[in-house]
Amino acid sequence: MKARFLVGILLLLMVATLSAVAKDIRATVIYDDRATDINPAQTPDGTDQLWVTTADLTRATRFEVKPQGVCREELCFPLPKARQADFLRKQSGKEWFNLTAFAELVHQPVARDTATSTWYFGLRSDQRETLASLRAPNFSLPDMAGNPHSLSDFHGKKILLVTWASW
């Protein structure tokens, strides 16, 4: 009797967990400044994760899951082998992909509006401009007597730039 009761409780917990994980929603994904309606999408209760089918992943982002990783043309991001379950799962005959976990992997900011179920994905780290060099750009400023001086006038010499702003 106790064993049946425990099995029954265990089954109820499993069903409750699966229903929380498999909650279908309608979502709007904005990726590369292009909006795509996704139906169904999934967000496990209590998380900020967005799961989409692999077909919808390609439709919304032009990325597709390949054996070497998540790819778009020649650009490919390998998925960590130890974390495959964080990115991919099969459910109800469909393959699902965790788009927010991917955004975290590629250092992509995500904003979510829960009221409208809209997800905005910003620029990935590979899309952002990086500082080309640590050299200061050339500029000209007058000295106390009003004579103009350019930074390039001091090329090859050590200089100390002291800046100040009132804000």
Image (spheres, rainbow, N blue to C red):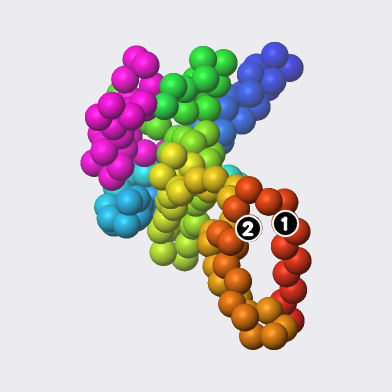
Seen in the image, is 96 located left or right of residue 85? left
Seen in the image, is 86 located left or right of residue 89? right
What amino acid is found at the position of numbered circle 1 in the picture? Ile
Decide: is 141 above or below 87.
Answer: below
Q: Which residue is mark 1?
A: 159
Magenta segment, which residues? 48-76
Picture coordinates of residue 152 (x, y %)? 56, 59
Residues tagged 2 and 1 counted as in contact (Cβ below 8 A)? yes
The quarter holding residue 30 reads bottom left
Seen in the image, is 33 located left or right of residue 82? left
Picture coordinates of residue 157 (x, y %)? 68, 51
The tag earlier along the polypeptide, 2 or 1, is: 2
Asked whether residue 34 is in view, the answer is yes
Q: Tag 1, which secondary structure?
A: loop
Q: Nearer the viewer, residue 75 or 104?
A: 75
Which quadrant: the N terminus? top right
**Residue at (32, 51) in percent of width and height:** 32
**Residue at (25, 29) in percent of width and height:** 73
Disc 2: CA contacts within 10 A as few (<14), some (14-19) or many (>=20): few
Picture coordinates of residue 33 (x, y %)? 32, 57
